[in-house]
Amino acid sequence: MEIELQAVRDFLAEHPPFDHLDEGLLDELPAHTSIRYLRRGTSIPPDDADGCYLYVIRKGAVDVYDGEQLIEKLGEGGCIDCSLQTNRETAHARTAEDTLLYLLPCAEIERLRMQSPGFSAYFTDDSGKRLRKALTAITATSPVQSSDLDTTEIAQIGNLNPVTATVDTQAHKAAQVMRDANVSALLILDDAQLVGIVTDKDLRNRLLAEGHALDTPIREIMTPAPLTMPPATSGLAALEWMTRKHIQHLPICDNGVLKGMVSISDLLRYQTTHSHFLTSEAARATNVVDLQAISARLPELQVQMVMSGATAAHVGRAVSSVTDALTIRLIELAEQQLGPAPVPYVWVAGGSQARREQSSHSDQDNALIIDDTMHDEDAAWFEQLARFVSDGLAACGFIYCPGDAMATNPKWRQTLKVWRRYFRDWIEKPEPMALMLSSIFFDLRRVHGDKALFDALRSEVNQLTSQNKIFLAYMAANALKHRPPLGFFRTFVLISDGEHDKTFDIKHRGIVPIIDLARVYALSAGIAEVNTLARLEAAAKTLAVSPDGAADLRDALEFIATLRIRHQAQQIRNGEAADNYLHPNSLSALERSHLKAAFSLISTMQEALGQRYQSGRFL
Amino acid sequence: MGLLDRFRSLDSRRRTLLERAPAGPLKAYYSVPFVSPKDDFRSIEYTALDFETTGLSPLKHELLSFGLINMSGTRIDLGSAQHQILRPKGDIPEASATVHEIRHQDTVGGIDEYEALLRLLSHLAGRVMVVHYHKIELGFLNAACQRHFGIDFLIPTIDTLQLAHRWIEGRNLYLRPSDLRLFNLARRFNLPIGAAHNALSDAVLTLELFLALTAQRLKEAHVPIHSLTWN
């Protein structure tokens, strides 16, 4: 067989269902195969199909939908069955990116099915099972899921590492275990099987009230054979059922195997961790301690949103809105203490909060712009305000900005006149310091205070930046500093600094480059938006970037940033500190190939930007 | 090619060559009309062709192998794939052997240039040829036709190197000459890379690249083939 045909044969042989075919049948495949290249967003089969085919993805990706709902994401080697539509009337498939496909005629597939039962099984009894599997696989990836109790499984809400003890444990030892783990229910195992449950109430009613000895074996006071539910039970069903049965704790079992436990309070808390709940709580808080308690639930919010299929953009908006609410309430509390502001002012956020791209508890970046009518004696009021809010945010877990870009720094607590001068200097005399600050101060958003003050500064800055080519060239050069790890999956350009061995920094190598590109586009086109997706959308309508390039970058950002928040959610769930260091092995083959494509896209766009501003001259 | 030829349609030049060609395979080739330049590129029968040679000069060097594969509209037909080794008259210079990895002993069962030309002419009649860098395939075919029939070779040709050049320039991207090499383009477009410098693998890759380069134009209702051809 010719080398190219051999390569096609070998590729098919590696992927189901072709892996069921014997050598002889595999050898016949290439002669019947044809190749097509479909652009992103093309239906499969395409409108211009000249016959019935089984489509096998050689390179690229395909989304399978049932109606509007994404049910499966197929990568290299994935098959799109020609009988897709006959199995489910509403099912359809569409290329998720430019995709190269191998086509095998349906008549040939029928012939192979007659000759190989293993091959044939893939198309018959498995189709329902495959669809269901796909559905559960994407509940964690679908961006359209709400985080309602009725669409969330108890396995995602409950504790998957419940505290357990064996049946012959003495009652007081069991109570110690519960005290140490700070739980109100203990699951009792016999030979690894769940046989009972003991709660605080059981210890009181069946042990103490009855006057039994403290060393009574726990099996004598436990509730034997507790009711359990499978992991896929919806949160709402579990809540209704537990309310009706008057139970507080529900073990989660899968075919008799203990998987976890969910409590009434888990379910209630789940409902109340939505961001709008946290923001309205923040608005009612009367002191920093209350705000601290609300803020402490941000990591939980992030985890829940991710578990219910939110993208990074959703999480960023939610976390930033809570951070805004905390900031505003702190300012209001400060004003209650300090009295009304002597002159108008505006509190602005910079960096990720301004862009609404925060993950839980990032650094705080903020500044104060004060009306030019301020007198010298007013300065103390603003200093106290800055101190109060900044300390309050720090108490809430937003650590002080390492670069001191905060309103507590007198440099960043100035009148509009001074801010105007700052920006004019940065833009007209670009220097390393200004560029360092650019990711903070060229992404500013009003959080609280006088809108007119902020708008005055912003419109002036937008006008200045879009007209100054030299400044833009410096910004462009700066945007090329963080390069995606292009050869990453081949050559393993990874960080090895001990703690993060063999990982890569997904924020600085994947997300920051896109944020930086979008900032340059926005500044060059005088776009007021600071959110990266919004900047890209707005820039696509200008000459700053091609519409296709902007759309590609948006997709790349959503994908990379969502990988990051999922990684962080996993760490938070495991009780670890969230970071940006991903291990390539933690990604699926499909995710890796998407990531690779996203990196090369960023690199292409960086190259185009560098070309445009001839940034080599400034590096 | 005469001075005025560039102003004449390919098909009228074909008719001239048909009159001049001696009876035989080249006349048979020219008796099949070329596609109309206005035909939509999705309705065309293509053949991608790739040569491995002993060097870059059609007058001095020899053909060592060809690979070809057909595409109907936008569907590449792997069943049509052909790969053929030729037996050169002279040596295989080391400089070329390190690229295509065809050793003299591999060419023992190979056919000669005339036989290869007959097969290619009968295959290419009426079709549009797709190559990456037309100077090699067109140059060697032309030289062979001159040697055996004393007449020029002509075929509507798509050069994916030229299309890729346009694609990159159209996006204002920085272009290094090496960016236009088939393998670097394959990487840019996320195409699978098989055996390098095998004539058939390169022919398949050339078609895949052609599809990738034209995918964006599928949105357009009508794309005349002359907007994509090199000649």
Image: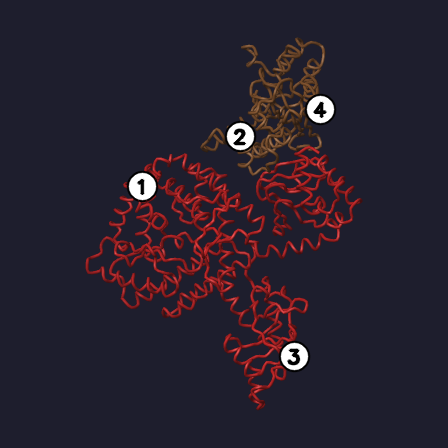
Chain colours: A red, B brown
As shown in the figure, which amino acid type bears the numbered disc 3?
A: Pro
At 42% across and 36% down in the image, what residue appears? A543
As shown in the figure, which amino acid type bears the numbered disc 4?
A: Gly
Residue A431 spot, x, y in % from top left: 29, 43
Residue A444 vs residue A472, the one in the foreground: A472
The mark lying in front, picked from 4 and 1, is 4
Residue A343 versus residue A589 in the image, above or below: below
At 44% across and 59% down in the image, what residue appears? A360
As shown in the figure, which amino acid type bears the numbered disc 2?
A: Arg
Task: Return the mark for residue B109.
Answer: 4
**For the residues marked 4 and 3, what is the alpha-carbon distance in whole angstroms?**
83 Å
Residue B130 spot, x, y in % from top left: 61, 26
- Can residue B44 be seen by looking at this rendering? no
Q: Which residue lies most toward the bottom here? A: A211
Write down the residue under mark 1: A464
Residue A249 spot, x, y in % from top left: 58, 74
**Among numbered discs 1 and 3, the one appearing first in the sequence:** 3
Q: Label 1 marks which chain's residue?
A: A
Please give left or right for residue B131 compared with residue B173 in the image.
Answer: right
Marks 4/3 in contact by CB < 8 Å: the verdict is no
Task: Return the mark for residue A224.
Answer: 3
Marks 3/2 in contact by CB < 8 Å: the verdict is no
At 36% across and 66% down in the image, what residue appears? A395
Residue B153 spot, x, y in % from top left: 62, 15
**Mark 1: secondary structure:** helix
**Mark 4: secondary structure:** loop
